[in-house]
Amino acid sequence: MTTIRTFEDYQQVYRNSVEDPESFWAAVAEDFQWHRKWDTVLEWDFHKPEVKWFSGGQLNITENCLDRHLATRGDQTAIIWESNDPAEESRYITYREAYHEVCRVANMLKANGVEKGDRVCIYMPMIPETAYAMLACARIGAVHSVVFAGFSSGSLIDRINDAGCKVVMTTDGSYRGDKVIQLKSIVDEALEKCPTVERVLVARRTGTRVNMKPGRDAWWDDELKTVSSECPATVVDSEDLLFILYTSGSTGKPKGMVHTCGGYMVYTNYTFRTVFQYQEGQVYWCTADVGWITGHSYIVYGPLSAGAITLMFEGVPSWPDMGRFWHVAEKHRVNIFYTAPTAIRSLEKAPLSYVKQYDLHSIKVLGTVGEPINEEAWHWYHEHIGRGQCPVVDTWWQTETGGFMISPIANITKLKPAFATLPLPGVQPAVMDENGKELMTNNIEGRLAIKFPWPSMARTIYGDHQRFKDTYFSTFKGKYFTGDGCRRDKEGYYRITGRVDDIIIVSGHNLGTAEIESAIDEHSAVCESAVVGYPHDIKGQGVYAYVICYDKPHEEENLRKEIREMVAKIIGPIAKPDKIQFVSGLPKTRSGKIMRRILRKVAEGDTGNLGDVTTLLDPAVVDEIKAGAL
């Protein structure tokens, strides 16, 4: 039994899944189309670390997302696309239409030299062609690396070069609210430093004039005119690479998380259907961007493999006004609405009239993703968007996990505001103390680890397995360390308390402090910097930068502006520091290590509880930092 319809079902299924994980996941995997069944369900060793699911199994994930639905729901809508511009007509794409479009894009890739195993960078906005591009890569066994279209050319360079991408897929431009972003120009700038790229395929979106480099660049729609709308799926092994997705690392170099085909398919499908309790014909809307793992798992692969109707939204929640989300939800009669706490907090501050003018009675399930949700935002969301009647599934998971790990199940799990509640079937959490001992009782707090593999977990960091081992498997031997702190209450419910490493979660997006510091240090006036996160009413966490200059700045505001612009140029606007405090020194130990604990406390306004500073190289610098806190 793997289906859950009551809390008693959950308890039984969960018990089965941890007592005999292999039988449990084999039963789930039976529901998919395989060209060849697996020889072994699971091979694993967390000390190496090495994990393989469904070894020997052969499949193509796109056959499970598209082909298998054609006979029963070929004329059903697969993707609803809503433009950035509310006046532009929505698009309703059926499973049959999506199938043929994906095949055409797959043939276009093949005609442009892409073969099984080649890496393809996708740098595109939230349009259906972006989903087609991802699925087309999977169709032919190529590996996609989607880069969020809000990132700068510098971030694009890092990701293209690390993956050794052969082809870039992009658009002439993109819309974001009332702005037009010159995507092709950013690609052109990046490719001056990307020697592996042979072809650039450009879809038209904004009509922006762009430079097309002869021999390298080609228009997407011109290329499609010459290819067939049928493309046989390339059969791949369960453990072949499906995609690489970059997430910020504490060293400054982004980590290319590798996800493989079979286990990822099985897990994202199962968790999508289970957590949302998805029913045939429901309209499901995840507001994330496909540039993040949420878009991969719960806009494209999970919903389409489940035969769902998935809504893609190109715009932003605040344009043309703060009622846009609710306008779209009413327009398309959305049944399941899944968004980030950052968006909720932002919309919560707008007048309630923006909500009340729309009929949201179609919504049956609400969800949150990207960071822990605070209680105030949870209650506002539940009361005003859910009318006090819709369950809020507060999902905890990561780029590295591939899918939901700890979450309520809609209408089944008893809710507790700001708690991710209970682990999903097959997920075995462990709360660890600082000495690496697992805390076995309830009503405790520690660091969250996972002690048994699950099918969608990342297999490695692309090209750097040692870093994968050091980052995730060295803190607690034989366990995956999430990097998050957590509390487990007396009922066994989990509450995620935030990152314990050098990662800041800004609006649900992981940003490495080292990466931001490196960008700040590029400014000619800057000698050294240190970046920490601090509580932010809207974003969850803001970026607080302590900056040492070679000379005392005369125009501090001008310099702050220049530093922010430099960070935006090197990483992207999302990483711009919210606060920049100029200091003469940083709190360092005698060995030169920056005491970020102290900087975090100052940034949080908790200056009365800094602990012992006498061991610092220069304790006086702490008083100066406290006095100048912003």
Image: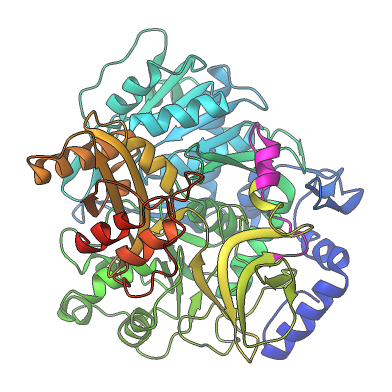
| Position in image of residue 103 (x %, y %) | 56, 34
Magenta residues?
450-470
Q: Is residue 425 above or below residue 528?
A: below
Direction from residue 81 to residue 445 in the image, left or right: right
Question: Does 54 appear in magenta?
Answer: no
| Position in image of residue 558 (x %, y %) | 10, 41
The part of the image, by quadrant, that contains residue 12 is: bottom right
Question: Does 452 appear in magenta?
Answer: yes
Between 140 and 544, which is closer to the camera in this rendering?
544
| Position in image of residue 515 (x %, y %) | 41, 41
* Residue at x 71%, y 64% (from the top left corner): 450
Residue farthest to the left?
555
From where the camera sits, is residue 443 visible?
yes
Question: What is the number of callouts on the image?
Answer: 0
Between 532 and 161, which is closer to the camera in this rendering?
532
Between 519 and 345, which is closer to the camera in this rendering?
519
Q: Which quadrant: the N terminus?
A: bottom right
Q: Which quadrant: the C terminus?
A: bottom left
Q: Is residue 307 above or below residue 59?
A: below
Between 609 and 543, which is closer to the camera in this rendering?
609
From where the camera sits, is residue 228 visible?
no
Residue farthest to the right?
39
The part of the image, by quadrant, that contains residue 626 is: bottom left
* Residue at x 43%, y 70% (from the top left corner): 611
* Residue at x 42%, y 74% (from the top left corner): 373
